Amino acid sequence: MRIKETTQSLLNNIPRCIPVILVLMLLPALTAALPWQPPEPIQPAYLHILAPGPNSTVTSPIIIKADLRCGGYDLTRIELVDIHGKLLSRQVLRLSSHLVMPSHVTLPIYFDMPQDEVKARLTIYVNDQFGRPLSLTSVNLTLTSKDSEINPPRDGQLAFVISTPQEGSTHTGDTLQVKGWMRPYNNSVVIFELITEIGGIIGSRQLAVPENSGEAYIPFEIEMPYIFVTSTRNVRLVIHQMGENIPGDVVLISRQLWVAP
């Protein structure tokens, strides 16, 4: 059973009197209802925050525990921002590229204690050798000067499981097909971008997320037109989702590709 075929069958059974725009609005819900899940075993996330878990209440210092699987890139950045996007704390970890992956880290993050409770986001991310985003994960927290309450972590599986394109593959023409499954962090749109070595964005698409999608994976398939390709170029396919209340990304994965005319 293919997504396109199943969706088309469902659309054929929709009464003709329903406006086309309403049909388009129903498409995400129809796709989300498909009983498709990514093949087991599902790859672990490249970056996984073990503690504190999502929506924990924390005091200073925050004792962070995380697993890092981004081998070959030695700079890992950790940031804490409040609900207004103000940077409260930043650390840069320099890890040896020869470390066995995953690498487990534990470290404290200090911040000025608020008088009242403050909503914040803790983010861990890694960039590639060209400065393009490679991987990012985050947890929303409540900062307090009172008692901590630490919640358990997420299960550590990838938020986006990509079946195509494959890492390092070469693509010709002017359109990239992206297929896979997603398990969004929230109801914000999922953004797909193709970024060159110098940081230029040559292709971009957005995908709506069905409300209340829960913990199940949702299959998706999109086509990304791209431009400005006159010779073979190194690009990174970046898939990310932004926060609903606090500025910035909440999750991001990527794949390095080659595109040619």
Image (cartoon, helix red, strand yellow):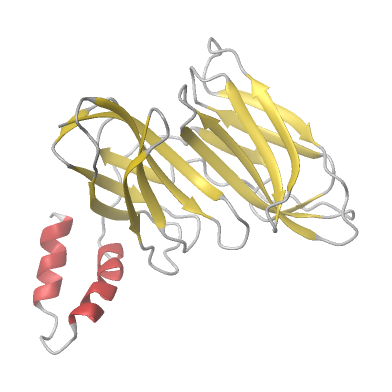
The quadrant of the image that shows the C terminus is top left
Residue under the point 23% across and 27% down: 169
Residue at point 12%, 86% (across, down): 15
Residue 124 x %, y % = 60, 37
Going by the image, does 23 lie left or right of 111? left
- How many numbered dots are placed on residues in this image? 0
Q: Quadrant of the N terminus?
A: bottom left
Q: Residue at x 45, y 25 (%)?
A: 130
Residue furthest to the top in view is 98
Residue 186 vs residue 133, the one in the foreground: 133
Residue 28 position, x and y percent, is 29, 66
Q: Residue 141 in the image: x percent, y percent?
A: 70, 53
Q: Nearer the viewer, residue 9 or 24?
A: 24
What residue is drawn where x is 68% and y is 34%?
65
Residue closest to the eye, 192 or 151 = 192
| In the rendered image, the vertical position of residue 145 relative to residue 68, given as above or below | below
Q: Quadrant of residue 226?
A: top left
Residue 24: x %, y % from top left:
23, 73
Q: Is residue 206 left or right of residue 178?
A: right
Query: Residue lying furthest bottom in this view?
Result: 17
